[in-house]
């Protein structure tokens, strides 16, 4: 048996996007109040010091998110800042995951993007069993 913890850190941003290939109103330039969650997992807790009892400090996850929010996401036009020609929730979740991965966030498990209150998307590279854990943790995050 292994111990495993999954942390979720929520983030929010306001941004515009446009889906040029869409056959409905999403083809028009429009904006959303986006909500995201970064999931990080770990199998050990820090044993001493200020991070004692933690897989990772939530504040450290926020530190990784901050430059993405400032420079690419919050109050930006996502088609332009991300370089994604068609920034759907799916494309955006993968883009954020890859940026966090490149910046060295350890234990990165998944990135969730909610484009609206009723639409959610999750990007992960983990096997199905781990994914079920993330899905279960969503109930708590959604509260
Ligand atoms: Zn949209």
Image (spheres, rainbow, N blue to C red):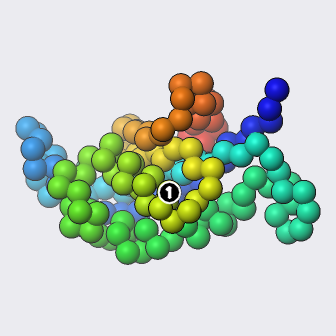
On screen, residue 74 versus residue 3, left or right, reads left
Disc 1 CB within 8 Å of nearest ligand 1 atom = no
Q: Mark 1 points at which residue?
A: 101
Label 1, secondary structure: give it: helix
Residue occupying image coordinates x 25% and y 52%: 87
Query: Can you give x and y, in whole percent of width and height, for residue 89 in the image?
Result: 32, 46
Would you place residue 95 above or below residue 64 in this image? above
Residue occupying image coordinates x 56% and y 62%: 104
Would you place residue 134 above or below residue 128 in this image? below
- Name the one closer to the observer, 95 or 24: 95
Residue occupying image coordinates x 75% and y 52%: 55
The quarter in which the N terminus is drawn is top right
Q: How many marks?
A: 1
Query: Can you give x and y, in whole percent of width and height, for residue 64 in the image?
Result: 55, 67
Query: Can you give x and y, in whole percent of width and height, for residue 107 in the image?
Result: 63, 50
The quarter in which the C terminus is drawn is top right
- Name the one closer to the observer, 33 or 65: 65
Using the rendered image of the protein, determine whether residue 17 is visible from the camera's viewpoint.
Answer: no
Query: Can you give x and y, in whole percent of width and height, for residue 130 in the image?
Result: 60, 30
Residue occupying image coordinates x 56% and y 44%: 109
Using the rendered image of the protein, determine whether residue 111 is visible from the camera's viewpoint.
Answer: yes
On screen, residue 74 versus residue 133, left or right, reads left
On screen, residue 76 versus residue 9, left or right, reads left
């Amino acid at each position: 048996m292994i111990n495993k913890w999954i942390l979720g850190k929520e983030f929010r941003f306001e941004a515009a996007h446009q889906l040029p290939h869409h056959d409905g109103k999403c083809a028009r330039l429009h904006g959303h109040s986006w909500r995201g969650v970064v999931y990080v997992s770990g199998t050990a807790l820090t044993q001493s010091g200020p991070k004692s009892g933690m897989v990772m400090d939530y504040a450290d996850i926020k530190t990784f998110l901050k430059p993405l929010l400032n420079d690419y996401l919050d109050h930006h036009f996502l088609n332009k800042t991300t370089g994604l020609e068609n920034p759907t929730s799916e494309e955006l979740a993968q883009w954020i995951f890859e940026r966090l991965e490149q910046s060295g966030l350890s234990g990165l498990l998944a990135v969730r993007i909610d484009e609206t209150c009723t639409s959610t998307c999750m990007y992960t590279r983990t096997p199905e069993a781990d994914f079920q854990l993330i899905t279960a943790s969503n109930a708590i995050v959604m509260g």
